[in-house]
């Protein structure tokens, strides 16, 4: 059996795949794609026509989209189940994951990339609505104390990486979840997801994520070079993380131009 994961260590979706493989205990090769070097090699585009990590190649057969990969891995390999046995619970896990990809994460990027400080409050309020929605779903469908159900599932393994990335927005856009009863369930779930060993063990530190996503705070995504920068913040080879100071909180393009 051969299994190779094409990954990028800072990507929350690739982390979901790394978590799935770690929970199942599946030995595999890992190939770190340099997402700052475009166009990607032809051989990679043949495996992954959307040009995205994660991409998993199992016995020569490629697969992409982290949710699809996780379910495939769960079906094909032995080890602890990533999805619940119960069909209704499985559906709820998928429902939450769909919301994560379609709503929860895009709101994170919108707030992080916002350059108009006057709009921060509105975007923070929209983001809080999404957290509130999740809190309500956890109360509606959850049967667990801290996890959604009794034991972690793909819901926790998917949202763990997302919650870790919300820390970036706390830093750059002063986003906070109010410490009120209204958010008690989602806070407890966030802490439970982030606290899982497998989530922590597959993620860079918060400080590293803050440094790597500094260009997003200046609205330059996916390794695009902001004016005046020699290197993309994604380019940890050309610009080693240990050589970088912590970027200022509230960073935006305008502020960073003034700073240099
Ligand atoms: N829906 C995809 C999203 C994957 C994704 O957006 N990966 C990003 C890194 S976080 C990527 O490969 N970006 C490279 C590019 O767009 O060039 C999944 O769940 O796998």
Image (tube, rainbow, N blue to C red):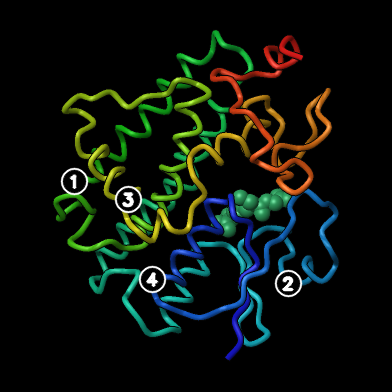
Location of residue 63 with respect to 216 vertically, above or below:
below
Name which residue lies at 68% across and 58% down.
Answer: 52
Q: Secondary structure at mark 1?
A: helix
- Front label number (1 vs 4): 4
Disc sitting over residue 23 in the figure = 4
The answer to whether residue 77 is above or below residue 199 is below
Q: Percent position (x, y) of residue 70?
A: 47, 68
> Between marks 4 and 3, how big is the CA–CA gap?
14 Å
The residue located at (31%, 50%) in the rendering is 195
Q: Which residue is mark 2?
A: 47
Q: Are marks 3 and 2 in contact (CB under 8 Å)?
A: no
At 48% from the left edge and 40% from the top edge, which residue is drawn?
206
Q: How many circles with numbers are drawn on the protein?
A: 4
Upstream in the sequence, badge 4 or badge 3?
Answer: 4
Q: Secondary structure at mark 3?
A: helix
Q: For this view, does 24 lie left or right of residue 143?
A: right
Marks 4 and 2, how far apart at CA? 25 Å
């Amino acid at each position: 059996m051969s299994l190779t994961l094409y990954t990028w260590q800072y990507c929350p979706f690739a982390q979901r795949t790394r978590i799935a493989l770690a929970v199942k205990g599946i030995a595999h090769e890992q190939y770190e794609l340099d997402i700052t070097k475009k166009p990607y090699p032809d051989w990679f585009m043949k495996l992954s026509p959307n040009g995205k990590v994660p991409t998993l190649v199992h016995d020569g057969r490629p697969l992409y989209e982290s949710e699809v990969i996780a379910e495939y891995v769960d079906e094909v390999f032995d080890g602890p189940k990533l999805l619940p046995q119960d069909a209704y619970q499985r559906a709820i896990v998928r429902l939450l994951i769909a919301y994560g990809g379609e709503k929860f994460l895009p709101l994170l990027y919108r707030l992080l990339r916002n350059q108009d400080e006057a709009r921060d409050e509105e975007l923070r309020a929209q983001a809080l609505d999404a957290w509130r929605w999740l809190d309500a779903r956890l109360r509606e469908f959850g049967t667990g104390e801290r996890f959604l159900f009794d034991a972690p599932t793909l819901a926790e393994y998917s949202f763990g990486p997302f919650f870790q990335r919300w820390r970036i927005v706390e830093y750059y856009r002063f986003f906070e979840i109010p410490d009120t009863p209204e958010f008690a369930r989602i806070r407890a779930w966030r802490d439970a997801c982030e606290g899982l060993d497998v989530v922590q063990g597959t993620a860079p530190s918060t400080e590293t994520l803050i440094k790597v996503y500094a260009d997003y705070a200046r609205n330059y995504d996916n390794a695009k070079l902001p004016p005046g920068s020699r290197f993309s913040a994604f380019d940890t080879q050309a610009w080693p993380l240990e050589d970088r100071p912590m970027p200022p909180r509230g960073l935006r393009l305008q502020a960073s131009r003034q700073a240099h």
